[in-house]
Amino acid sequence: MADLSTDVRYIKGIGEQRAKALSKLGITTLRDLISWFPRRYEDRTQARRIADLVPGEAACVAAMIASPPTVSHIRRGLDLVKVRAVDDSGVLDVTFFNQTWLKNQLVQGGTYIFYGKAEGNLLRKTMVSPVVEREGRREFTGRIVPIYPLTAGVSQLILSRSIRQGLDDCADILPDVLPDEVRQAHHLCRVEYAYENIHFPESPEALDLARRRLAFEELFLFIIGLKRLRSRREVVRVAPCGAVDMEAFYKALPFTLTAAQRRCVEEALSDMRSGTPMNRLCQGDVGSGKTMVAAACVYFCVKNGRQAALMAPTEILVQQHYAGLAPLLETLGIRCALLTGSTPLKMKRSISAQLAEGEIDFAIGTHALISEGVAYRDLGLVVTDEQHRFGVAQRADLAAKGAHPHILVMSATPIPRTLALILYGDLDVSVIDQLPPGRQPIETYAVPGSYHQRVYSFIRKLAAEGRQAYIVCPMVEENDELPDERKAVTAYAKKLQSEIFPDLRVAFVHGKMKPKEKESVMAAFAAHETDILVSTTVIEVGVDVPNAAVMVIENAERFGLSQLHQLRGRVGRGKHQSYCILISDNQNEETRQRLKVMTKTADGFKIAEEDLRLRGPGDFFGQRQHGLPGLKIADIGCDTQLLKEAQQAAEALLERDPELTTCPAAAERVTELFTQRANALN
């Protein structure tokens, strides 16, 4: 009999090849398979008559094949199967691309269900490549059909059939991690019913029950795990840092820290004096001065006789930090070093030896800081910048270079405090909610696509004044096709260079490039060797280019508000007035409302709260590697009441049974989910 850790290869009907394709989605075990939840559902329960089909709308239609299907060979790689279907209200002409096997499947006189987008007019209705199956089959029609996230080589059909097989294999072995009294008190369905109806819902009501149960379970386990992490953290004791006169540091600064920065510094120093390791998140808007908070902590740590390290995700960011921090700290007697992948081997060995001997106080670097040959005499403080770009393992590896060092995580993604407590539940949170005085607000405009020529003229005008521009394209995802960011960005950059700005220097950057290529393009833009940079959101976290004064975002409705705010933060970093232009032809009420928020406020926290209200936490939980188990089905933005219920239930259980001896299934699952995270804190 299978158990939930069984490799998907050994599940009936899957085999080696399909398992290989599923592994691209991160599906390697039976548990992974049944926990691959749909991203949306299509209601295919109601069939319309042909006459009632509305052009542009997807619908089911039951119709009889009126004549034998025909096959036309158009050219190499393109065959068309055409068939005419009828019901008592009209005629439907259906075309299939490259599905020649349907010629023998679709039988004249047989009744089939077609599901697809109708086109045509009142007299003649058509469908192109609809889903089709024999009437009464009910695999893809006649029910609520789940639509899953896909990857190359895995279709909806393959995934749906694999999940069906997986559920059949584990129907009798699904452990219920919720104690009976919790399940009954919160009116939750049984686990078998939940998994069956999240994938193959009997009705909309059954789907709601299933989703509520699985979301509650996820939040319940998550909260138990966080509480255990916190209690685990609190028992680690370290030698408290001694008092340091910080005035010398403050006087060395060429500006005065804001009250918010001073407050964050005090919160961090209080942690470092407490006798337990600091685990603090310092979050603040772009330009709010998080780096100076980190610099104060470095100064405090080094004056206590210990070493500090700051790790950032790219060489450009690291060099930027080094250029900003080393001159300041070296005047205060702190010996600094820069360590990256491109540091020459001889110099790297020298820096490593000096770190091991304690001759360098503060190392700033990339992943090179955690490479095998690098050791520290006494690493007392670890700072990570743009934490969501790192996996938790890298933060853990750097922390492992010392004996329970203090950890400060810097993030420029403003996150509402309620969500930050979930995302970073094992960290204390400091918020810099003030910008330094004198920063010019970025003028933000939301315009339709008809403004393109005016936008291009504006870019040309600024370029003539010596400014630079970013143009961001979203990745386009249609139906179940995978987005091709490379194609979108390169095609647009080529068009701009050849047709719009032949006299300016246009470059492009996208996520499929190798890290060295990306860094090279960004460095060239920072050095003003290019005028316009066309990009996907890979520039969302990046290098300071004070000369960049305009950010144009195409199809702005495709981005979350927090992401738009992050992108906008790439400009407005110099002395020039800067602009952000949001282009969108989608003018429905929700889009107008969202983009209006961007034009009205520059406060990242207000924007994040609004984003959470409008969209849920997708922006925060999307691709971020925050190091805690990701939520697969619960939505913090929408499930706030469920979160409260799960929190109360988890706290009540832990109060009466801290070791979870009465519910071993929950204890085991929490351990599985948090193993990586717990190891990071050991």
Image: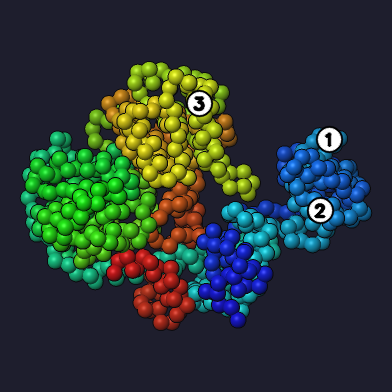
Earlier in the chain: of badge 1 and badge 2, it is 2
Residue depicted at x 18% and y 60%: 376
Which quadrant of the rendered structure holds the C terminus?
Answer: bottom left
Mark in front: 1 vs 3: 3
Name the residue rendered at 42%, 25% in the picture. Answer: 505
* Residue wearing tag 3: 496
Amino acid type, label 3: Leu
Residue 337 picture location, percent across and down: 18, 48
Toward the viewer: 114 or 440? Answer: 114
Tag 3, which secondary structure? helix
Please tell me which residue lies in front, 233 or 207.
233
Q: Are marks 1 and 2 in contact (CB under 8 Å)?
A: no
Amino acid carrying label 1: it is: Leu
Name which residue type carries label 2: Leu
Residue located at (36% from left, 41% from top): 519
Residue 524 on image: x %, y %? 35, 33
Question: Can residue 680 be seen at all in this image of the molecule?
Answer: yes
Say the numbered circle drawn on residue 122. 1
Compared across the picture, whether 160 is left or right of 238 comes to right
Q: Secondary structure under badge 2?
A: helix
Q: CA distance from mark 1 to mark 3?
A: 42 Å
Q: Is disc 1 in contact with disc 3, using a CB cutoff of under 8 Å?
A: no
- Find disc 2 in the rendering and name its residue: 102
Q: CA distance from mark 3 to mark 2?
A: 44 Å
